[in-house]
Amino acid sequence: MRDSVTVHMAAPADKIWAFVSDITTTSQYAEETFEAEWLDGATAPAVGVRFRGHVLRNGRPPAYWANCTITVCEPGREFGFSVGVGSSPAVNNWHYRFTPSGDGTEVTESFHLAEKLVLKLYWALFGKLRGKTNRRNMQKTLERIKEIVEAG
């Protein structure tokens, strides 16, 4: 119920972190989230800040909004958030870790589903397929981030 992908980027960790943690840029690189907006008057990332993402799961309708809460916000090091569904505040957790390496940064995107019975059943039935999709999407997302941060 978890996985990660790492891509080396020829850019400093602080620059990549600033780009990824500004959720208004998400549509430039995310595979399934095509829009995101701050909630509750927020304009910048911080632990506890909420935002919502407009998602087209698996690239197919229906599109929906998912409310998210920032859980980790360490400039240049890590950015993470939980995704809520309905009344459940943390169904999935997404993280980006930034590790300086050689001429740039190793960027790791990861997810882990909450330890809930319904999610364990979901993963038992659909986990292989969804896990493959998540892994492919994380790779695409990181490659897009790489292209953007290395270009300027």
Image: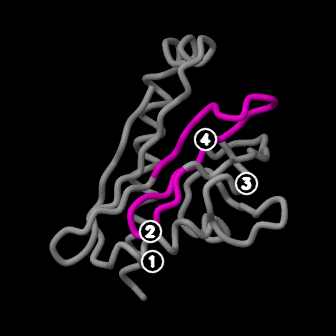
Q: Is residue 89 magenta?
A: yes
Quadrant in the picture for residue 57 = top right
Q: Nearer the viewer, mark 2 or mark 4?
A: 2
To which residue does mark 4 refer?
58
Q: Nearer the viewer, mark 4 or mark 3?
A: 3
Local secondary structure at mark 4: helix
Tell me the quadrant of the picture where the N terminus can be found. top left
State the SS at label 2: helix
The residue that appears at 67% across and 71% down in the rendered structure is: 44
Q: Nearer the viewer, residue 88 or 145?
A: 88
Q: Which residues are magenta?
A: 72-95
Decide which of tag 3 and tag 1 comes sooner along the chain: 3
Q: Earlier in the sequence, mark 4 or mark 3?
A: 3
Which amino acid lies under the numbered mark 1 shown in the image of this protein? Ile
Name the residue type under label 4.
Asn
**Residue drawn at (62%, 62%), measured in percent from left and top?**
46
Mark 1 burial class by Cα count in 10 Å: few <14, some 14-19, many 20+: some
Query: Height in image: 117 above or below 80?
Result: above
State left or right for residue 122 relative to residue 14: right
Of mark 3 and mark 2, the one earlier in the sequence is 3
Badge 2 or badge 4: first in the primary sequence = 4
Q: Are marks 2 and 1 in contact (CB under 8 Å)?
A: yes
Residue topped by disc 2 = 145
For marks 4 and 1, give the CA distance: 23 Å
Placement of 133 over or under 98, stated as above or below: above
For disc 1, the marked residue is 148
The color scheme shown is: one colour
The question of residue 70 being in magenta is answered with: no
